[in-house]
Amino acid sequence: MSEVQKQVPVTGTNHPKQAVMKFFGYSLIGIFMFFLPISINGSSSIPLDHLVTFLRNGFPTVVSVYIFVIIAFGAIQPFVNRSWKKSTVTKVLSFFKVIGLIVAFMLYLDIGPNWLFSPDMGPFLMESLVTPVGVLVPIGAIFLALLVSYGILEFVGVLLQPMMRPIWKTPGRSAIDAVASFVGSYSLGLLITNRVFKEGKYTEKEAAIIATGFSTVSVTFMVVVANTLGLMEKWNTYFWVTLVVTFLITAITVRIWPLNKMSERFYADQKGDPEAKVERERFKVAWQQAMKVAEHAPSIYKNIWLNLKDGLMMTMSILPSILSVGLLGLVLAEFTFTFDILGYIFYPFTWIMQVPEPLMAAKAAAMEIAEMFLPALYAAEGPLVMKFVIGTLSVSAILFFSATIPVILSTEIPISIPKLLVIWIERTILTIIIVTPIAYVLL
């Protein structure tokens, strides 16, 4: 990317007052909604999460009907627009979307086998994954327009460029994706990544690095994992170790196959708009870049509509997949030896690193590929060090079939399932190697 980066001349700093007001006004609202926790009724979270909680608790019937309608449209859409024929992957995903609709129908009408209605099967997926994602993504997309369209992305990108590119080989603006994922949701982070990628601001390689290395579950999900594993007394240690380890592992995976061999092309072979390379007066250049974007941004109504449409399309694409693939993972974990066998991939590493109960830890690590909550449920009664390793791994591995993998595949980012599986194995092994000694020192 360094060959295509542009040198930015430093020019005057007079900008229209309207652009300045857009930058501060809209960007600050976006930052407030996504990044500033507030306490309401004793619960501390970001305003977006409070809004989603209010909608879910205040209008449960409406939300329930909305979720079913979205799943139905999402399952039918590939056959209406004939996109299901595009590739083997789209055929498989389209099949799983139909299965997701059938499962949703059974859950809503309360018909089907008893195991489907077990608290840790269908109801767990609907309450913990499908409904939160279904409400969060479209609502988040509305405020996403304020966060990404009026200059804050470019402003932060220029300031963080010296750190992001040498360490993670991504533009400075990708820091927004990472923060949005950790504080908001992986789905929001991927929504940002896909939007910016389609605008020609990321190459295919950069978009893949960001999608597989920065699109973590949110802090809210981390709290659930920590609670399940009994780690809340060690919350600060768990959070910061997980944060550092996740991005440290990304810095390693960008330098090994398959990420290091991905294409440097831009979306649809367009010329692209690579992030400018800044040599001096970084803050001034950051301000100029932000003002340029704010001046030429579409109207707020058009921006909100475009982002809301993207959010609804992504929601329709992922909800049926989350339900069907997630349920398959839970069934495999409960009724088969699949994860026992997969666990042997990681057993040499859990044994060498002296993770307590290494075979159990290896199986828990293997479960993450189906659903990131499964390892915590399985390892909840294990030794403290093992629980800490598994809790960190649940987040740092990033990729799992009930959510992040279908979301990535629903974007325009050209990365295949086999490559995603290789990246998952790499991230899982690296987590075990890095976190285990840290756990022994800090716990």
Image (spheres, rainbow, N blue to C red):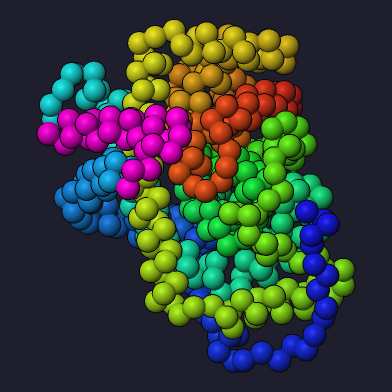
Q: Is residue 338 above or below residue 165?
A: above
Magenta span has 183? Answer: no
| Residue 379 visible in rendering | yes
Which span is picked out in magenta? 81-109
Which residue reaches farthest right? 280
**How far from the left and from the top, in percent, is residue 66?**
22, 51
**How far from the left and from the top, in percent, is residue 261?**
73, 37
Toward the viewer: 243 or 317? Answer: 317
Quick one: quadrant of the C terminus?
A: top right
Looking at the image, residue 200 sits to the left or right of residue 281; the answer is left
Residue in the picture at 43% in, 38% down: 86
Q: Is residue 78 above or below residue 278?
A: above
Q: Is residue 73 above or below residue 340?
A: below
Quick one: quadrant of the N terminus?
A: bottom right
Residue in the picture at 69% in, 32% down: 258
Toward the viewer: 163 or 98? Answer: 98
| Residue 383 visible in rendering | no
Q: Residue 421: which quarter of the image?
A: top right
